[in-house]
Image (spheres, helix red, strand yellow):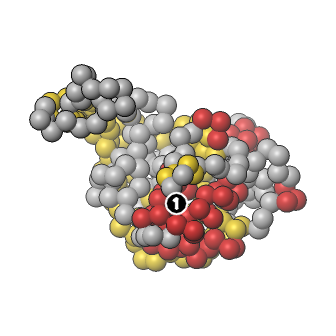
Amino acid sequence: MARRTRPRLKAQATAETSPQTLPKLSWLRAAYQFHTFTYRDPRAPQSSAPGLPLVSPTAVLLGIASTLFSLGLVSSARAFLAQAHLCSVVIDPPDGAIFFRAFHQLRRYETDQNKTSKEKFKPNARVGLTNINQGVREHALVEGRITIFVGVPEMLVEPVRLALRNRDHLGTRDSLCSLAGDVETCSEPTDVIFLTPEEWQSRLPLTRGVTIVTLARFVKGPLRPTVSEHWWVAGGSETNLAPYLIKGRFTGTSRGKIYLKSTVNS
């Protein structure tokens, strides 16, 4: 696919914000190495989750905020969340990934049904770890690195750089990663095929050697994730699921599936 110019109106920007008022974004690049990797399709239930070879833009942005909070930089985390809807994310998948299914048993404290409604969900150590949630999840053995590009307003560059340096997992918490090299300042990655539906639908017919995956993204802002001293973003009207176009193809096997970013016929 030929090099392209990415539109200035980002998918994460609010519908009420015009392109002329969007801040100029500075871009950072971070490449991560994995032993095993897992990120489930956001459409799938947790108990039976097919895997993807990359994460959603929301996972990257909320991961930055989570890391800043964990480092004790509360004001920086809140400042980032206030402008997260203006940030842009581009993800370059690994060279390849071999997926396999893993059986999970999650043991939880059984709740005491005799307690009041306010107390019944608290752990009861006398009852013990008896509740078991079972499920199957796809994990991947990754060839190469997953590279994250984040475009942020200039005032957020250093906090985001610090967060990307200290990010220890992408996807799920058991998807541990290590930063390869350092976080670099870069230009907008126009040569990476990571297209929003608004971008790739205007470029039909599609080029061979690409596939569509469903990812989550922010659509409205600013976010309002803080309640008292706690923070969270539960989705709803602030996010949606969108079909992103990425480079590569999936091949099904009897024991799982394989993703290859470059194929002979592409």
Q: Is residue 241 left or right of residue 138?
A: right
Residue type pointed to by label 1: Ala
Q: Give the percent coordinates (x, y) of residue 39.
A: 40, 45
Q: Residue at x 51, y 48 (%)?
A: 232
Label 1 crowd bin: few (<14), some (14–19), many (20+), radius 10 Å: many
Tell which of 252 and 155 is nearer to you. 155
Label 1 sits on a secondary structure element that is helix
Quadrant assignment, res 257 = top left
Question: Can you see residue 91?
Answer: no
- The structure residue drawn at horizontal position 36% and vertical position 26%, both measured from the top left corner, is 117
The residue at 37%/63% (across/down) is 168
Q: Is residue 48 above or below residue 183?
A: above
Give the percent coordinates (x, y) of residue 169: 37, 58
In the current view of this chain or complex, which residue is farthest to the front? 116
User: How far across and how far down the image is residue 71, in percent?
Assistant: 43, 70
Give residue 126's quadrant in the image: top left
Most extreme residue toward the top, as rendered? 114
Q: Which residue was labeled with disc 1?
A: 65
Question: Measured from the top left, where is residue 173 in percent x and y?
Answer: 34, 52
Q: In the image, 65: left or right of 143? A: right
Judge whether 117 appears above or below 92 on screen. above
Q: Nearer the viewer, residue 88 or 112?
A: 112
Q: How many marks?
A: 1
Nearer the observer, 67 or 240: 67
Q: Residue shown at 55%/56% (left/top)?
A: 61
Q: Is residue 26 visible?
A: yes
